[in-house]
Image (cartoon, rainbow, N blue to C red):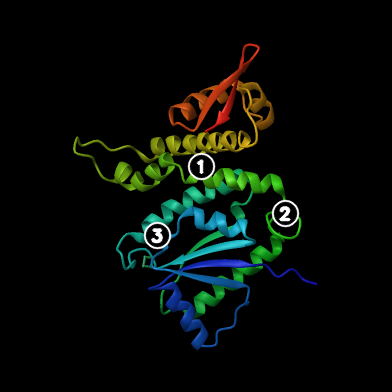
Amino acid sequence: MSFEPKILGFLCNWCSYAGADLAGVSRVQYPPNIRVIRVMCSGRVDPAFVFRGFEVGADGVIVMGCHIGDCHYLEGNYEAEKKYAMLEKFLKLIGMDNRIRLEWVSASEGTRYGAVVTEFTEHIKSLGPAPTTGDNPDQTILTKLKAITMAAGSDRMRALVGRQRKITEIENVYGEKTDIDTFMEIFDNAIVEEYERAQIIIALEQKSKSVKDLAVELDIDSSIVLEHMTILKTRGLVDFGEIIGITPMFHKL
Ligand code: FES
């Protein structure tokens, strides 16, 4: 039996959803694999929605919105682009970045809507089922998915994504502007750091562990784990209780 992927689509109300409607009334033919969730704007699609989609069985997720310049909330699709870029980087950490897509489809592009859905469905078919789906999902990937969900939702990542355009495109009151390369370097480092911190928190869910235990389990250098523990303790997310020999054991708060 051929593999029929489950595709989750987030469509903005004003353009892409209307485009899908036009495809329907125009009897445009496309695969029936997509399940649509209507959102008011593509900028509303939080990365957590996409991660949740994978967690509950999607093989691929597509976000569609108005063409750049046509967003009914003026800048929503610019925000969608920034969030999507972060989403892609996080999914790359777990090898699933080739299962998402961002497309602009207007209300008059019913034919294009059908073509985009057809192409994306064929692409996901060629990849096969997502490792997070089926009767026997890959538990390691699911744990990593949980970690990237936690990391992408951290205050630090939300602040970086939310302020990216302001920081790189508009000068602040002191006439300062950060160049995009410097910003991206900070952004990429933050993604790795927040992912590792989320992995540490998840690893401490069941029992207390030392820095060395965590370093071995997560394959992260122990000096880096120690730096993360200092930050996580400052954030009130972990603490150490008992000391075994001379080794402090950390637990999740
Ligand atoms: S309203 Fe369509 S992308 Fe914002």
Q: Quadrant of ligand 1?
A: bottom left
- Image coords of residue 138 (percent x, y): 72, 50
- Report the residue marked by disc 1: 151
Q: Is mark 3 within 8 Å of ligand 1?
A: yes
Q: Which residue is mark 3?
A: 43
Quarter of the view holding residue 178: top left
Left or right: 208 in relation to 151:
right
Label 3 crowd (10 A; few <14 / some 14-19 / many >=20): many
| Percent of width and height locating residue 148 | 55, 45
Q: CA distance from mark 2 to mark 1?
A: 22 Å
Q: CA distance from mark 3 to mark 1?
A: 19 Å
Toward which corner of the image does residue 207 lie, by quadrant?
A: top right
Residue at the (48%, 27%) spot, across then down: 233
In the rendered structure, which amino acid carries the disc numbered 3?
Answer: Gly
Lower position in the chain sequence, tag 3 or tag 1: 3
Where is 64 relative to 220, above or below?
below
* CB within 8 Å, label 3 to label 1: no
Secondary structure of the residue carrying tag 3 is: helix
Q: Which residue is the site of mark 2?
A: 137
**x and y, in percent, of residue 147 in the image:** 57, 43
Location of residue 154 in the rendering, given as x and y in whole percent from the top left corner: 45, 42
If the image is split into quadrants, where does the N terminus sit?
bottom right
Residue farthest front in this picture: 242
Type of amino acid under label 2 = Pro
SS category of the residue bearing label 2: loop
The residue shown at (51%, 75%) is 113
Judged by depth in the image, the label closer to the viewer, 3 or 1, is: 1
- Residue type at tag 1: Ala
Q: Nearer the viewer, residue 134 or 113?
A: 134
